[in-house]
Amino acid sequence: MALHLRSLYAGHTTGMPPESEWLAAAYKHGERIGEAEVRTAGEPARLDLTPDRTELSADGTDLSYILVEAADRDGVFCPLADNPVTFGIEGPAEIARTGNGNPLSFEPFRDKQRRLFHGKAMLIIRTRAEAPGRIRVTASSPGYEPAAVTLRSKRK
């Protein structure tokens, strides 16, 4: 299988230029069998929150893992972002832990703030026992468009 790259930015020889697009195509026996587009990110402009699920049990032990990512104005992931993010929770839940995968970080795991590492962080929330309801999670950072996601805890 051969891999061919076709740059959409001609004449650049020192790596991918800012905000460029590349197309990778896979060939087998001369026939194109697949392709993927790669886009470099612009300046970080917003935060995105992606929960592992939105329906939780109101038992005081159920957790939701919420991925936090920095993105540019077009929604492209920004792997170099390392700014601090502040979290807020409204409703019957609390911060169980925060993390970012940085082995050199001394930030406390139960803090409401966490610095991004390679553009990502993780927020883990825990429901409150016998307290069903709407849970609104927010994330903000100076200079970034904030993010919010709504979860629900229910009695089972």
Image: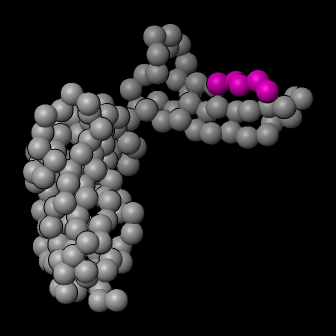
Along the viewing direction, whichever of 14 and 98 lies nearer the viewer: 98
Residue span colored magenta: 1-5
Along the viewing direction, whichever of 61 and 38 lies nearer the viewer: 61
Query: The C terminus is located in which quarter?
Result: bottom left
* Position of 100 relative to 133 (above/below): above
Q: What is the quadrant of residue 23 in the picture?
A: top right
Q: Residue furthest bottom?
A: 155
**Residue at position x 17%, y 40% in the image:** 115
Along the viewing direction, whichever of 2 and 124 lies nearer the viewer: 124
Q: Can residue 70 be spotted in the picture?
A: no
**Residue at position x 31%, y 58% in the image:** 66
* Position of 98 relative to 14 (above/below): below
Query: The N terminus is located in which quarter?
Result: top right
**Residue at position x 10%, y 51% in the image:** 111
Q: Position of residue 36 (x, y in %)?
A: 62, 39
* Position of 46 relative to 93 (above/below): above
Q: Position of residue 51 (x, y in %)?
A: 35, 63
Secondary structure mostly seen in the magenta stretch: strand
In the displayed structure image, the side of residue 78 where residue 148 appears, left or right: left
